[in-house]
Amino acid sequence: MGRFMDAARAWGLPVGPHGGRCNAPHSRLVGSSCLLFLLCAVHGATHRDPTSCVFALLTTVLSFASDFACNVPRSPLSALLRARIRAVDRAVSTTYALWLTRLAVFQFGLQLLAALLPLVAMLSYSRASPTRAVWIVRHSLWHLFAVVECLVVMEC
């Protein structure tokens, strides 16, 4: 059990009586979950959808920069630059979500919008995290959930 706990802490998971390394400003779990968006980029590239591919690549890079790289202890980046990276991340990911919504509506009509409601709920769940430890898990799940939703929409 000790090895499991050590491995979980190394990934930034909130384990143990004090949440392991949850108080660290960044988490490998969150950083790794950002890279899941590469699956959407691969899907876009293999299905000859360059717009979705580019959006997914931008989302991957900016999500990683915002959620992981900007949170590294003693970051060489200024607070202003980190704030701008986070703002650009939100803008690009929102634009990507609107692009996917457009794809869904034009291909399947408004009934597919109902499938996006859980996506909004999951994002709200992540943002409502009461502690950093809870945010690590919830935000990683948000990334996983968002990638699955993207792939479902792009595959339809």
Image: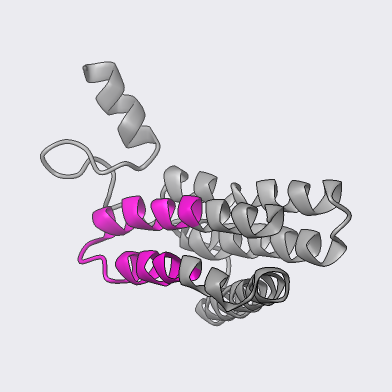
Q: As displayed, is residue 44 above or below residue 78?
A: above
Q: As displayed, is residue 73 above or below residue 100?
A: above
Determine if residue 141 is in view. yes
Count of labels in the image:
0
Quadrant for residue 76, please give it: bottom right
Question: On the rendered structure, is 145 left or right of 3?
Answer: right
Please name the residue shown 40% across and 65% down the image: 118
Please name the residue shown 41% across and 48% down the image: 27
Q: Nearer the viewer, residue 60 or 28?
A: 60
**Magenta-colored span:** 116-145
In the picture, the quarter occupied by the N terminus is: top left
Please name the residue shown 59% across and 47% down the image: 36
Secondary structure character of the magenta stretch overall: helix
Question: On the rendered structure, is 29 left or right of 87?
Answer: left
Residue 102: image location, x then y, percent: 69, 77
Q: As displayed, is residue 150 above or below residue 29?
A: below
Residue 61: image location, x then y, percent: 67, 59
Reply yes or no: does residue 111 show up in magenta: no
Reply yes or no: does residue 135 show up in magenta: yes
Determine if residue 26 is in view. no
Question: On the rendered structure, is 49 left or right of 149?
Answer: right
Quadrant for residue 78, please give it: bottom right
Please name the residue shown 20% across and 66% down the image: 130
Residue 97: image location, x then y, percent: 61, 72
